[in-house]
Amino acid sequence: MELPESPTQSAGPALVLVHGFPLDRRIWSPQVDFFAPTHRLIPPDLPGFGVALHEKSIQTLEDYAKWLLAVLDGLGVGSFVLGGHSMGGYIAFAMHRIAPERLAGLALIATRAAADSPETAATRETNAQKALAEGPGFLADAMLPKLFAGDPPAAHVPTVRSMIKISKSAGVATALRAMASRPDATPQLATLKIPVLVIAGRQDKIVPAAESEAMAKAIPGARLVWAEKSGHMPMLEEPDLVNRELLDLVKLATASHP
Ligand code: MLT
């Protein structure tokens, strides 16, 4: 997989941005524009999404984290600031479980620590089977009304549809099953000893505001930033805010983990 590297890189940890489900690296377009000229920015497509092939060896969120570590090892990245959007946040918690020493900072964006309820897990299995039988296209109509604060903005609809259209059925089913079987990350929150930024969309229809607030409160010293005009996609809905906050996090991580 080809990954962009910025021409003039700042010292300090790389910034790795992991997209949510069933999306791809294009959700980070405003962050790529902002950070790529000055920072080592790595926004991968997860296996089975975007231009990345499905990887049969992946079953759990830990497997995604191991895959990401292998990518980063290949790029010579040591420590990094990991920003995870929604499912990307679940992978960030998995990364913290398997390689905490590599994390210089964490940005948890529109994500949650809790595991799935049995009902949610069952719905994911239904959707996994549907994606395998029919392809992932049905997810576009199911997801679009939930992603943004109001109606889906016309500027983003074609891109979101394209992300879902080019995702691989097997990759979508794998991601759904991995999310359904993930452990509760709540016990990890008190053990996070690195700079942590929580960005929550005040109007998120997928992760309720109260859940974000409780998660941030349980992380010692975490900075909670409300994206007041955002739903589940603050990196696209309020990109300037997200860029500014990520930049501050990278600076803090660089100072505390040079
Ligand atoms: C995501 O945006 O990654 C998903 O909505 C997360 C989830 O379904 O739990």
Image: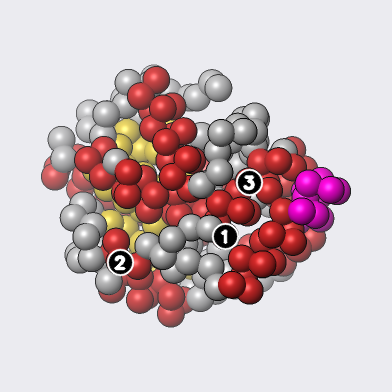
Q: Secondary structure at mark 2?
A: helix
Q: Say which mark, if any, is on residue 164.
A: none
Q: Say which mark, if any, is on residue 174.
A: 3
The answer, for residue 236, to whether it is visible in the render is no
Q: Secondary structure at mark 1?
A: helix
Q: Which residue is mark 2?
A: 187
Part of the protein shown in magenta: 129-140
- 146 or 139, which lies in front? 139
Q: CA distance from mark 2 to mark 3?
A: 25 Å
Q: Earlier in the sequence, mark 1 or mark 3?
A: 3
Place residue 52 in its image quadrant.
Answer: top right
Q: Position of residue 22 (x, y in %)?
A: 65, 50
- 36 or 185, which lies in front? 185
131 relative position to 87: left or right: right
Q: Residue at x 51, y 34 (%)?
A: 44
35 relative position to 3: left or right: left
Q: CA distance from mark 2 to mark 1?
A: 18 Å
Q: Which residue is mark 1?
A: 180
